[in-house]
């Protein structure tokens, strides 16, 4: 068999981590992510689960060792668990870790099947523990369902990391409580700066909270010790002395982390975006559906490595257009 070279970009970064979006659809409408009347992609354009699996195999053959399934909401795609099970069989056979990012609404049903398929860690996004604010942020009344899902994940033996977008004037005063709750439950918590991706109904800048400011406020209450842990993602971590838990900061606007980027993203329609903040992409669906899928997908992956930019250039300002027209629900973050 011909040995294919691992994915390495022109800045000598090894790409070992694939974020694979299985759907752009979602059962929530988080106000910073998408408008209430979001236009989803026509289903006919979306790859089948079998095609998503075939693509994942191509990535594994090129040295990808970690796959995160995302969306939209990955668990609203019908039969997605079949894909999880198929990928789970690659664990220990090229794949080191299979994980997913979810809003948690379907976790009560899926936690055990995910664990049984080999998933050991999940990221669950939750921005508030207040039911009224949850409904305002997500435009849906689902807090109890999400909390049940998180509890089910813990019961099933899944390690849970909570992701929270820090939002000025919305959840900013609740962040200490979220830290105490998450750490009390044994979950890490990571704060994220809101990113200017896709048009939403309001102005994102109105609720943009730079994480250095959020950290200063947390340090009025907690002692934070920076730690060097790396989970292969962009977060920088601190240990909270009072809770003993880990607190992550993903600061794409105030603290660029692109130099260590090891990631690549594929949308549910098979478009590989070389950078979350950039337009550079290759069409893996066309390659996969061509006469010579093996050679054409390999060539497309080489092209992706050639065009992956050195860094993103996010900026957030009043009246400014989003950095990219596509929403986070297309690439899955
Ligand atoms: N639906 C799943 C969820 O919410 O976890 C997976 C997809 S969602 C797009 C992935 C992550 O992106 C979530 O943690 C969400 O809070 C975050 N996100 C969505 N839009 C964002 C934005 N504009 N800026 C920063 N984070 C965003
Ligand atoms: Fe859905 Fe996740 Fe976007 Fe919220 S952040 S609307 S849960 S895709």
Image (cartoon, grey):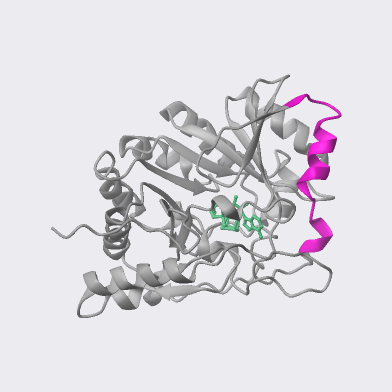
User: Quadrant of residue 90 in the image?
Assistant: top left
Query: Which residue is at a point 36% across and 51% down the rendered structure image?
Result: 64
User: Quadrant of residue 201 in the image?
Assistant: bottom right
Ligand 1 shown in quarter:
bottom right
Q: In the image, 78: left or right of 211?
A: left
How many marks the image carries: the answer is 0
Q: Is residue 307 above or below residue 81?
A: below
Report the magenta residues as a range. Answer: 204-224
How far across and how far down the image is residue 276, in percent?
Answer: 56, 63
Of the pair 47 and 291, the residue shown nearer to us: 291
How far across and how far down the image is residue 233, in percent?
Answer: 54, 45
Of the pair 72 and 258, the residue shown nearer to us: 258
Query: Which residue is at a point 33% across and 48% down the rendered structure image?
Result: 84
Q: In the image, 103: left or right of 193?
A: left
Query: Which residue is at a point 83% across and 60% down the rendered structure image?
Result: 206
On the rendered image, what quadrant is the C terminus found in?
bottom right
Residue 243 is inside the magenta segment: no
Residue occupying the far left of the picture: 1
User: Quadrant of residue 50 in the image?
Assistant: bottom left
Of the pair 269 and 135, the residue shown nearer to us: 269
Q: Is residue 239 above or below residue 80?
A: above
How far across and how far down the image is residue 323, in percent?
Answer: 67, 70
Q: Is residue 25 above or below residue 218?
A: below
Of the pair 149 and 284, the residue shown nearer to us: 284
On the rendered image, what quadrant is the N terminus found in?
bottom left
How far across and how far down the image is residue 262, in percent?
Answer: 48, 52
Query: Which residue is at a point 31% across and 62% down the rendered structure image?
Result: 55
């Amino acid at each position: 068999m011909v040995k294919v070279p691992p994915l390495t970009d022109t800045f000598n970064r090894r790409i070992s981590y694939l974020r694979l979006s299985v759907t752009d659809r979602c059962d929530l409408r988080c106000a910073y992510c998408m408008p209430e009347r979001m236009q989803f992609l026509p289903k006919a354009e979306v790859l089948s689960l079998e095609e998503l699996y075939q693509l994942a195999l191509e990535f594994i053959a090129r040295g990808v060792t970690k796959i995160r399934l995302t969306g939209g909401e990955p668990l609203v795609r019908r039969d997605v668990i079949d894909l999880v099970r198929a990928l789970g069989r690659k664990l220990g056979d090229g794949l080191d870790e299979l994980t997913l990012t979810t809003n948690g609404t379907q976790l009560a049903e899926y936690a055990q099947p995910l664990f049984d398929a080999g998933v050991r860690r999940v990221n669950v996004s939750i921005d508030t523990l207040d039911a009224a604010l949850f409904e305002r942020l997500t435009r849906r009344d689902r807090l109890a369902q999400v909390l049940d899902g998180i509890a089910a994940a813990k019961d099933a033996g899944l390690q849970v990391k909570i992701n929270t977008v820090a939002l000025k004037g919305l959840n900013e005063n609740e962040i200490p409580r979220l830290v105490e709750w998450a750490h009390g439950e044994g979950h890490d918590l990571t704060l994220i700066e809101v990113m200017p991706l896709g048009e939403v109904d309001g102005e994102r800048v109105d609720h943009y909270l730079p994480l250095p400011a959020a950290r200063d406020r947390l340090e009025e209450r907690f002692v934070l010790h920076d730690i060097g842990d790396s989970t292969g993602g962009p977060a920088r971590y601190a240990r909270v002395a009072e809770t003993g838990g880990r607190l992550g900061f993903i600061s794409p606007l105030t603290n660029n982390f692109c130099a260590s980027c090891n990631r690549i993203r594929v949308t549910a329609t098979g478009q590989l975006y070389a950078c979350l903040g950039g337009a550079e992409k290759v069409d893996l669906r066309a390659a996969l559906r061509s006469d010579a899928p093996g050679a054409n997908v390999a060539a497309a992956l080489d092209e992706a490595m050639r065009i992956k930019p050195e860094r993103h250039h996010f900026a957030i300002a009043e009246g400014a257009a989003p950095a990219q027209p596509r929403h986070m629900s297309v690439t899955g973050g």
